Amino acid sequence: MHALDTIAESMMKFLNLYEQWAKQQGYLNNEFFVLYSIGRHGQCTPKQIAQDWCLPKQTVSNVCKQLIAKGLVVYQIDSTDKRAKLLRLTTNGQEVVIPMLAHLEQIEYDSMREFGEQALVKFETDILKLTQILSQNLGLVGINHDNE
């Protein structure tokens, strides 16, 4: 096994930690990713969520429908682009999601502090650089990564 294998496996395990935590909170992983994005940004488009989490747009659309049915999110028209639909948390969604994300943020903060701020900044810089290099070498530069 070479270093990229270990990194790829570690990244999947890292993501899986969030999926397991989401399940403990009563959410499927894609539901959590959508709620996480809306909760962190206040509002966002389904396209932004799909891009951020590398999910197919149809998956995000289906999850949004489920979360709307649960009364957690609602669509609203973007005032700057009448064609775009923004997702935001309902009052009920805010009461549920904001405390959940605050709890997660504290866990993340504690983990980052334990890892070390300088080490984390270096890791972030290095993984972004490696991702860019790998993308270029795979011939994926300039290709639309919207997961359509």
Image (tube, rainbow, N blue to C red):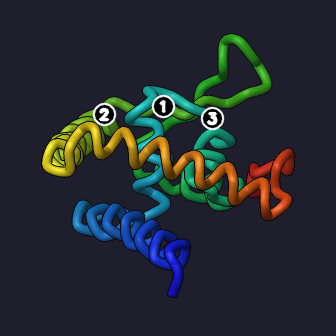
Of residues 83 and 34, the one nearer the viewer is 34
* Of the image marks 2 and 1, the number of the one nearer the N terminus: 1
Kindly indicate whether the residue at mark 1 contacts the one at mark 2 (C-beta within 8 angstroms). Answer: no
Judge the density around disc 3: few (<14), some (14-19), many (≥20) Cα neighbours within 10 Å. some
Image location of residue 45, percent across then percent down = 63, 35
Q: Is residue 120 above or below residue 140?
A: above
Q: Amino acid at mark 3?
A: Thr
Image location of residue 29, percent across then percent down = 43, 64
* Of the image marks 3 and 1, the number of the one nearer the N terminus: 3
Q: What is the spatial separation of the Cα atoms under label 3 and label 2, in whole angstroms?
A: 17 Å
Give the farthest residue toward the bottom: 1
Q: What is the spatial separation of the Cα atoms under label 3 and label 1, in whole angstroms?
A: 9 Å
Find numbered disc 3 in the image and state the secondary structure of the residue it sits on: loop
Q: Which mark is residue 133?
A: none
Q: Which residue position is annotated with label 2?
A: 94
Q: Amino acid at mark 2?
A: Gln
Q: Which residue position is annotated with label 3?
A: 45
Q: Is residue 123 left or right of residue 22?
A: right
Image location of residue 32, percent across then percent down = 40, 55
Of residues 5 and 17, the one nearer the viewer is 5
Q: Is residue 22 visible?
A: yes
Q: Which mark is residue 88?
A: 1
Q: Based on the displayed image, in which of its 4 quarters is residue 71 positioned?
A: top left
